[in-house]
Image (cartoon, helix red, strand yellow):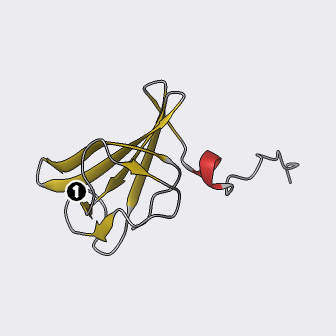
Amino acid sequence: MTAPADGVVAYAGTVADRPLLTIDHGDGVVSTLEPVAASIGLGEHVERGAQVGVLSVGGHASTGTLHLGVRVAGAYVNPLLFLGGLQRARLLPLG
């Protein structure tokens, strides 16, 4: 697993039997990767694309998949907003 953006490791450990890695990106933006067994520790600075751990098992993500959570000012937001993959909604005509 690689860091989605520059930041500082805010948490690396296990919560409720699932390994998590949380990165504080500054300006109120925080990302959490799960299930990820971290290869870096609390307070370490990471750069976008840097190796931060390996995919593990546990939590609500299906085996072999990664859950990416993003919070802005404490509120969860759609992570696709930060990955460039969220398309603008379009209204379609009826019928």
**Is 79 placed left or right of 40 in the picture?**
right
Q: Position of residue 11 (x, y in %)?
A: 26, 43
Front-most of residues 51 and 68: 51
Which residue is at the far top?
A: 73
- Nearest to the observer: residue 66 or residue 52: 52
Total of numbered circles in the picture? 1
- Whether residue 95 sits left or right of residue 57 in the image: it is right
Please, which residue is most extreme toward the left here? 17
Residue at 18% across, 55% down: 18
Question: Of residues 21 and 66, which is closer to you in this image?
Answer: 21
Q: Amino acid at mark 1?
A: Gly
Please indicate whether residue 62 sits to the left or right of residue 5 in the image: left
Task: Name the residue nearer the viewer: 70 or 92.
Answer: 70
Specify the quadrant that holds the N terminus. Answer: bottom left
Q: State whether residue 57 appears in this view.
A: yes
Query: Which residue is found at the position 61% from the left and 48% from the top?
Result: 82
Which residue is painted at 76% across and 46% down in the image? 89
Can residue 62 be seen in the rendering of this structure? no
Q: Position of residue 72 (x, y in %)?
A: 51, 30
The x and y percentages for residue 16 are: 12, 47
Which x, y percent locates residue 40? 27, 57
Instruction: Identify the residue under disc 1.
Output: 59
Q: Secondary structure at mark 1?
A: loop
Residue at 53 percent of width and 57 percent of height: 48
Quadrant of residue 51 within the rendered picture: bottom left
